[in-house]
Structure formats: C-alpha cells, structure tokens
Amino acid sequence: RDDSFNNIPSNSIFLLGDSYAEGFGVEYEDSSQYILEDKTKKNILNFGTQGVGPLSELILYENFKDQYAHESLLIYVYPSNDFTDNDKAVWEDRDKTRYRPYFSNDIDSLRSYYFTGAKKRDSFDSVFGIKSLIKENFWFSNVLRSFLIIARNENSPEETFSTNNLPLSFYYDASIKQQKQLISAYKKINELADQKKIIFVIIPSQNDMLRYKLSIFDQSYKDQYWFKSFIDFTKKNNKIFLIDLMD
C-alpha cells in the first residue's frame, strides 16, 4: 500500500511490520504511513505486510536495505502474534503447508526453516481464477486475501484463551524461547542497519490492554527478557528508541 519506490529521497524511513504497518483494513489516508508522512514531511518506504513476523522482517530488510536509500527504520512490534508467526513449534501441528520461514532448532536459530510440505500459493489465480491485473490494482483484492487467510486458518493462534483466569497476553505469556527468538531477529536487524536510527513501536492488542487493566495495571511485563532486551538496545545505542504504546 505505497507508491512506487522510484526516485526516493535519501532521508526516507524504512517501515517494517505486519498489517498495522501495511495499513490493512483502513482507508489509505487513515494509515499510519500516510499520517506520519504528512506530519514529518519525510517519505516512508512501507514494507509492512499482513501476516509476517520478525524473522520475515529480517529476511525482507536483508534483501532490500541496499536497494533503497534510507536514513532510519521504523519497526512495529505486535506481541500478540509476532512471538508466534515464525515459531516452528506453534505451526507444526497447526498447518505444515503454510509457506513461511520459521526459526530453526539449530544453534543458529535465524537460519530459516520451511516445512517439507509447504508450498507457495497464489490466493487469487489458483482459487478464484482472477487475473493478476485485479490483484495488483484493486484494493478489493485485499478483502479476498483476508477471506482466504481466515478460510485456510492461516491466522495466528487465537488470543481468546485465558491463563490464571486472565486473558492470554503475549506481553506477559510468551515463552522464554519465543522471547529469545524474537529478540535475535531484531538484534540482527540492528546490526544490518549499520548505525542508522531505529524506532521500535510496541503495539498492544485488545487482549493485552484488557489483561493490563484486569491485573490492576501490572507492569511486570517490563521485567521480562523481551522487554528488557529492547531497553538494553536503547542503552547501548543512542540511535535506538523505544515507544511502548501500553504506556
């Protein structure tokens, strides 16, 4: 959901994230990209894509960082599904045909793992027989894509389960392995950014906010490995900033 990246200014901002970054489901003028461009008067290269996680973002940045001039990065972190989108263990029993990179069980967890039966799928030509012209030029194609993701159960694990009589919230409930995997991907992006300014924006879901309120504004998530690691990024590099929208 962006203009062509031709003739872009060198002070552009490289945006990474999932559907929040993409602006999925809202009018273009209501997307964060459009609003931020209007307020900062800087060009944002919107690489936001629905359904991707931190490992996918790392691969994307590695492939495109040298092709498009940019002075800084803006990274949206959505704990509600970013901890699980590239978690092999979560999807092993759920959908092995889902074509996504997963963190490997090897010593180098950033070496992408793909399920043997995973296949690249064209949501439109193979299912609806719709010409590529439509999917490339019409916003309605996003509606069809969303429908197919739901129909094929490709969306992330449900957020509605509860633990200890409280809503499940990955601000609090991510496993230590999931936390370390997520941080390893963003740590690598930091390295690849080569001292460019980075702003991480952590976005709570409705479940996260409900858990926070029902727990009487419990800030213990800030003591967890994942959050402390983001704080550590900012302490070690004065060009890295953290915005936690739960605050």
Image (cartoon, grey):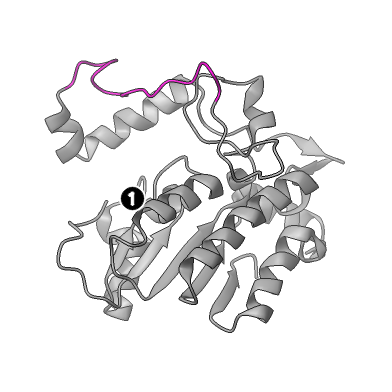
Judged left or right of residue 42, residue 237 is right
Q: Position of residue 105 (x, y in %)?
A: 70, 35
Q: Secondary structure at mark 1?
A: loop
- Asked whether 105 or 140 is in front, the reply is 105
**120 in the magenta segment:** yes
Q: Which of the pair 243/234 is nearer the observer? A: 234
> Most prominent secondary structure in the magenta stretch?
loop
Q: Is residue 61 visible?
A: yes
* Circle 1 crowding by C-alpha within 10 Å: few under 14, some 14–19, many from 20: few
Residue 18 shown in magenta: no
Q: Quadrant of residue 126?
A: top left
- Image mark count: 1
Q: Is residue 216 depicted above or below 94 in this figure?
A: below
At horizontal 67% and vertical 48% (from top left) the residue drawn is 181
Q: Residue at x 20, y 33 (%)?
A: 135
Estimate the x, y position of residue 207 in percent, counting from the top left: 66, 47
Work out whether 199 lies above or below 148: below
Q: Which residue is mark 1?
A: 26
Q: Position of residue 7 (x, y in %)?
A: 15, 67
